[in-house]
Image (tube, rainbow, N blue to C red):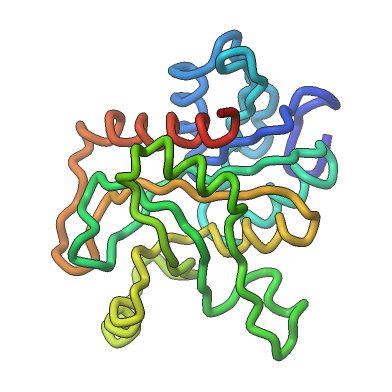
Amino acid sequence: MTFHIGAKPGQIAETVLMPGDPYRARWAAEKFLDGAEMVSETRGMLAYTGTWRGHRVTFHGSGMGQPSMSIYANELIRDYDAQVLIRIGSCGALQEDVAVRDIVLAQAASTISGPSSTLFREVNFAPVADFILLAKAFAASNGKAHVGGILTSDTFYDEREDLSQQLQRHGCLAIEMETAELYTVAARYQRRALAVLTVSDHILTGEALPAEDRERSFSEMVEIALHAAFD
């Protein structure tokens, strides 16, 4: 057990898929895993371990934002020896050719600041995905996923139109709130990480994914992540 994870030694798999919403961790475990068992519910952050096609997998919520992701990624790696961490979450699209329901694979994640930023002082560290996981996820999407840079933001309600315009101009695909810190923590411990994201809304058009369509769209994201981890 740690300050934030209640699992006993051996209850967390080497491969951990991390949705932001703890209830999505429960949904994914029930839908995709055989023999799923809840192994932690500390502070309401749910974690389930089971098997997918014979492979042990843990679904563990990360919460919202980089500080929350930093806590769970650090403890999963340091205290439970997680080797592969894949974020499965939503994002807001920034490019016209990226549509609601599309899958985005984050090759790199820019950020203004984050829990690890003070370690680098004047250096702007560039956190990136594990290439093998990225390549396998792209193959699992049948070449349909968008691959490129994203922004990990500290704010959900951001009214800086100038920033969105510059991000769009420089080819940034989408905005979300956790990936940059996940990639940074994984790099620190020499672990493998990837973010597989579903576009739930569009920053430019205001379009949003209807609630009734979310489960179908998110299922594709989880399947891609599982194939990336084990194929």
Question: Going 63% across and 25% down the picture, which residue do you hit?
Answer: 57
State whether residue 37 appears in this view.
Answer: no
Residue beneath the point at 47% across and 57% down: 106
- Give residue 171's quadrant in the image: bottom left
Instruction: Give the percent coordinates (x, y) of residue 21.
Output: 47, 41
The residue lying at 84 percent from left, 41 percent from top is 79
When the figure is inspected, residue 151 is found, relative to residue 62, above or below; the finding is below
- Residue 45 falls in image quadrant: top right
Q: Is residue 159 above or below residue 6?
A: below
Quadrant of the frame with the N terminus: top right
Estimate the x, y position of residue 203 in percent, counting from the top left: 24, 66
Q: Is residue 156 visible in the rendered structure shown here?
A: yes
Q: Residue at x 44, y 24 (%)?
A: 27
Q: Is residue 131 above or below residue 161?
A: above
Nearer-the-camera pick, 211 or 130: 130
Between 189 and 209, the one lying in front of the other is 189
* Residue 137 falls left or right of residue 204: right
